Structures are given as structure tokens and as C-alpha cells.
Amino acid sequence: MRKLSCFVAASLIVAMGASDAFADAEAGQGYFSAMGSYIDDDQDRLLDDGVNGGQLNIGYAINEHWNIEGMLFAAIPDFTDTRNGSQDHLGFGLDVQRVFMRSERFSPYLHAGLGHLNIESSNSSSSSDAIVISGGAGFLLDMFSSNVALRGEWKYRFDEGPNSLADNLYSVGLQIPFGAATPKFVDTDRDGVNDDMDRCPNTPAGARVDAYGCEVDSDGDGVKDSMDKCPGTPAGIRVDASGCPVDSDGDGVTDDKDKCPGTPAGASVDADGCEMDGDNDGVVDRLDECPDSAEGAQVDIKGCEIKEEITLRGVNFQSNSDVLVAGAESVLSDAAATLRKNPSITVEVAGHTDSDGAADYNEGLSARRAQTVYDYLARNGIAENRMSVRGYGEAQPIADNTTAAGKAENRRVVLRILER
């Protein structure tokens, strides 16, 4: 315990003397670090693993790639069998470090060294000494934007004592450089940032840059201010190479203001990027087959006013059958869309035939055909309580049943408007 107390006191004295510390150690600077250690002891030591030690390091940066470092280590691990008390470990050594990316905020390193370890047990007056060989890896992280860096390290320590034991030490703490440094300020592109710190060399003359020498992107759209033709773009807006909001559908309204993206090419749009609807019937001018519908009139999906019934031209059936022929479903799909557009309308699905065949049979056939249309509309989102079914057979012809053309017109299904 006395040894660890001396170790902590020494750490505080060095820290108090670091008032002239600079940023991470440069070539020619010294540094010190204090770290706590988790020790994974060799199982033959019969000690508990844990955070029970620490180390104080004082080093010198020889050049851009190499450090030399002195180390003082202390720990008080407990025996696995608590009846045996604990041990006092005190060691010192000399390490050599190979440093990578010294000038970066994150700087990894490899290290190897030689040292001495003294061990005393609390339950006896015996002590042992051993030569220690060590190696491992670590890093420095300038996470404080100051002269204090976070240091982490793994060390594999091999004890050349009587039992040749090996331990793993995991340490973390702080490192602070000290001493004078006279770095040369070189700014090749004259942007006010030292070349050593300049992540964007060859910045155009006069361009505004950040602390790392890179051009500023004030509105955060990914286009540098010097290239941005639309400064002040709102956050999250997709922009083109000039920094201007994109108009994906080419309707003249940029995506950030376009309430109707995907407008077809050439369509006339309003200030919100939505297609024009001159008669306000809910059908855009491009699709409106009946422009200038009366205000408030109920119209189908083609923009034409709905009268007493919705005709289903093209809804035909196989001969003497209620099975739809090809192409009929397209017409029924439009009819379903019209009913969805006008949710207050209720209809009678009325089936009709020509005069061929018995009247009773024709009435049943027309009812079955009307039911087929009813079923299709129900499957496509039209509530059943908005529809009823009736077969009129040959009773209500609209053309001459003595001609083939007339009979074709009489074979029909219509949606008769019951309520609006």
C-alpha cells in the first residue's frame, strides 16, 4: 500500500508541473501520462484479476515516428484465496514506441520494452525480483480539442523470474505534452491553415475554409460555398451539382415545394407543382374529356357529368353465359373508380338482354350477368350497401330487336343512379 501511495503522489506532482503543456507531443517535446490498469494476471500467480494498479509514464518524442518512454508501475492485487491477503507490485522500465499518424487526432502506436518488477506479499516478509520483457499496442485520441489526449494501451508482460509468468495489462488514462516546440508554419495554399493540419490542400484563393483548411459549406447541402449557386438551401433538401434544389419531374417547381411529385412531362401545373383542374371537378385538365363541367356536378373519372345512369360500354359476356369477355374488366375498373370518386352515389346494377330465347330464361340470365358486375365492383372497394342487383331480361330494350346491331345494344348492364 505504501508503494502505491508513493506512485499516486508522484503522478500528482508531475501533473501540477505541466502548466506549460501544449497539444499532442511533437518531435522534440516531452510528455507524461497517468493511467489506471486492469490486470489479467497469469493464473499461476493465484491472484484476482481486476482494476488494481496503474502506471506513470514520462517520455520524449525523438522524431515523427519514434518515442522513448520511462515507466513506473504499481499494483495491489488480492490473492484468489482472500485468507492469503494481497501483494504489492512495484516496477519500472524503459519502452520504445513506434508512432503512426502523430499529427492526426487518432494516433496508434506499437511498443516494446524491458523492465524490473518487485513483488512483496502482505502476509510475509518475502519478496521477489524479476526482469520483465513487454510488448503491445496503444492509441492516443485528442478527444478534448486541447493539449490533453486520451491514452489507451494493451501490454503483454513476460516475467523472467523463477516461474516465467505472463500477464496482460489493459490501461487507460490521460497524456499531456510539455516543453517548448517550434513548429514551422507552412501554408502553401494561403488559406490560413498550416499544411500539417490542412486536409484540403490547394484550396482556391479567397475561399472560406474551416479549421482543417477545407472549404465551408454553410448550408450543409454538400456543395462548397464557392460552387453553390443557391446558398441558404434548407436542411435536408436534395440539391444538384450547383447546390440548387432538384426538380425531379421537370415541372418548374423544385422538389422542396412540389406537393405533387412525379407530374407527367409537359403537364401544366400550379405553384404547388400540381396539375391544373380548370373546372374544379377533381379531374385534371390533361385527363378531362369534358372540360367546363358545371360547378358542383358529379363527374366520372373522365370528368364528364353523371346523368341518370353509368353506361358500361364494352362490358360483354360469353354467349348464353354470365362470364365476362376480354376487355370488360378494364371498363368495370373505371366504373369502380368513378364510384369511389363519388361516395354518396348508390346504384342499381341492372342487367338486360335481347329478345332471343324465352322471357323467363332471359330474366334469369340478365340477373346473373348483373350479379357478376356487382361482385367485381365489391371486390374493388365498392361497399355492398351502395349497390343492388336486378335483372330486367328483354323487358326494357333501347334498340330494335329485329336487327343484329339493335340486339347487341340491348344486351347490356348499366349502373342506374338511385341516390346521389
Image (cartoon, rainbow, N blue to C red):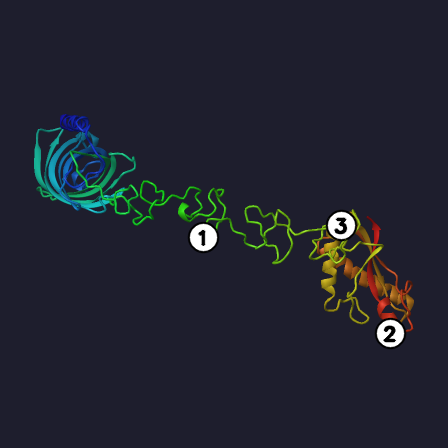
Q: Please give the label number shown on residue 93.
A: none
Q: Quadrant of the N terminus?
A: top left
Disc 3 packing (10 Å; few <14; some 14–19; many ≥20): some
Please state which amino acid type lies under the numbered disc 1.
Ala
Reply above or below: 235 against 358. above
**Near-viewer residue (417 or 222):** 222
Tell us which disc is closer to us: 1 or 2: 1
Say the numbered circle drawn on residue 404.
2
Between residue 33 and residue 287, name the one nearer to us.
287
Mark 1 surroundings: few (<14), some (14-19) or many (≥20) residues within 10 A: some
On the question of residue 2 being in view, the answer is: yes
Identify the mark nearer the N-term, 1 or 3: 1
- 72 shown above or below 245: above
Is disc 3 in contact with disc 2, using a CB cutoff of under 8 Å? Answer: no
- Asked whether, in this view, residue 200 is left or right of residue 219, the answer is left
Residue 317 on image: x %, y %: 78, 68
Q: CA distance from mark 3 to mark 2?
A: 36 Å
Q: Earlier in the sequence, mark 1 or mark 2?
A: 1
Query: Which numbered circle lies on residue 241?
Result: 1
Left or right side of 118 for 173: right
Q: Residue at x 29, y 35 (%)?
A: 145
Badge 2 crowding class, 10 Å Cα cut-off, few under 14, some 14 to 19, many 20 or more, is few
Q: Nearer the viewer, mark 1 or mark 3?
A: 1
Who's the residue at 52% across and 51% down the image?
A: 246
For label 3, the residue is 342
Q: Is residue 397 above or below residue 170?
A: below
- Name the amino acid, label 2: Ala
In the picture as drawn, the residue positioned furthest to the front comes out as 206
